[in-house]
Image (cartoon, rainbow, N blue to C red):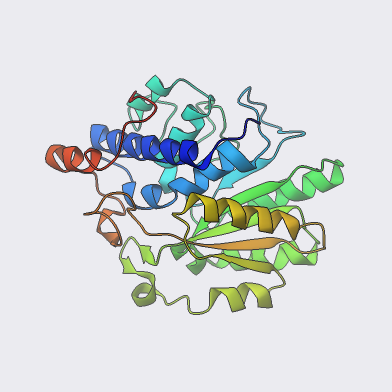
């Protein structure tokens, strides 16, 4: 995989954020907040860390795999998939439209390259990732499995069943990340259902836990993922607590749950795009 400079990766992040905003605005539906907040993570994965091919093979043999559990942040994933060559960026215009392959939550029925499992029913993605990681171990495939969850999603019981399962079975080829932005649809997580000490909880369940203090710094995200890879192969899965700001990159969206699932109007879109450089060309 071609290596990119920090400046090139930051330029991709700026364009991806423009894509997110334009997609959600065009259909007046979708989830811009956490999509903007997770942009550096997705760009780091697809443009720097994962071994993957855009000539998509659903089995992913000999490739690293990624599973998105909090599927409502599909805009950032679709943008990064298209910008890394899985499908033409022009298709981003069809986001959430009738008969589009770019559903509001990722789905497999439409056959969109890069999507291996439907997601968005919260709590299920980690279980799928564990299954894929176990399959790779059984098949002698040395590539890795990545997964991303939301912090509000930690309120789902299935997460904790999966959290017990992976260490029990020695799933040490898995890096799971939690987007810790402190927000969910109804408000701050500390008010809806306080998560308290996530690091201690996951360590108690038998995981190696690392912390990315600034998940909106591309260099720190990459360094954390490199650190996580160095901890694999020791009988334990790795969890990355990725601290981000919801709505990062747009001053009136940052740090609030109010943009969890709300689309900008025309004036707000113009304002937001004015804060983000067009670097790769708008679709």
Image quarter where the N terminus lies is: top right
Residue pushed farthest left? 267
Q: Nearer the viewer, residue 210 or 152?
A: 210
Q: Is residue 106 visible?
A: no
Question: In the rendered view, would you say 266 is above or below 197?
Answer: above
- Determine whether 140 is above or below 152 in the image: above
Q: Position of residue 214 (x, y in %)?
A: 47, 61
Task: Pick the residue in front: 24 or 79.
Answer: 79
Q: Does 105 appear above or below 259?
A: above
Q: Can you say whether 199 is above or below 265 in the image?
A: below
Q: Quadrant of residue 162?
A: bottom right
Residue 78 point in image, percent of width and height:
45, 34
Question: Would you say residue 179 is visible in this rendering?
Answer: yes
Figure label count? 0
The residue drawn where x is 46% and y is 54% is: 217
Q: Quadrant of the C terminus?
A: top left
Q: Quadrant of residue 188?
A: bottom left
Q: Nearer the viewer, residue 17 or 146?
A: 17
Residue 152: percent from the left, percent from the top?
44, 64
Q: Where does the image place residue 215, in percent across and percent down from the top left?
A: 48, 57
Q: Residue at x 47, y 29 (%)?
A: 83
Asked whether, in this view, residue 21 is left or right of residue 78, the answer is left
- Which residue is depicted at the point 16% across and 43% down? 268
- Taking 8 as reference, is 14 left or right? left
């Amino acid at each position: 995989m071609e290596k990119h400079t920090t400046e090139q990766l930051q330029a991709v992040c700026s364009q991806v954020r423009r894509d997110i905003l334009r997609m959600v605005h065009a259909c007046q539906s979708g989830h811009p907040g956490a999509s903007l907040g997770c942009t550096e993570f997705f760009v780091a994965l697809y443009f720097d860390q994962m071994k993957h091919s855009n000539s998509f093979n659903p089995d992913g043999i000999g490739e690293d795999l990624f599973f998105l559990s909090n599927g409502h942040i599909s805009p950032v994933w679709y943008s990064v998939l298209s910008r890394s060559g899985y499908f033409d960026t022009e298709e981003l215009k069809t986001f959430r439209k009738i008969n589009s392959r770019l559903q509001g939550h990722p789905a497999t029925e439409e056959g969109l390259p890069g999507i291996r499992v439907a997601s968005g029913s919260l709590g299920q993605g980690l279980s799928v990732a564990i299954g894929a990681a176990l399959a790779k171990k059984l098949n002698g495939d040395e590539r890795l499995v990545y997964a991303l969850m939301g912090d509000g999603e930690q309120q789902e019981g299935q997460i904790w069943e999966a959290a017990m399962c992976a260490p029990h079975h020695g799933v040490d080829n898995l890096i799971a990340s939690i987007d810790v932005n402190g927000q969910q649809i109804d408000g701050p997580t500390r008010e809806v259902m306080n998560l308290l000490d996530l690091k201690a909880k996951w360590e108690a369940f038998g995981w190696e836990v690392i912390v990315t203090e600034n998940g909106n710094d591309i260099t720190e995200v990459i360094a954390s993922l490199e650190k996580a890879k160095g901890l694999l192969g020791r009988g334990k899965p790795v969890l990355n607590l990725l601290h981000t700001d919801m709505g990062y990159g747009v001053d009136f969206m940052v740090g609030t749950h109010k943009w969890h699932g709300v689309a900008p109007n025309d004036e707000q879109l113009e304002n937001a795009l004015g804060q983000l450089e067009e670097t790769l060309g708008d679709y």
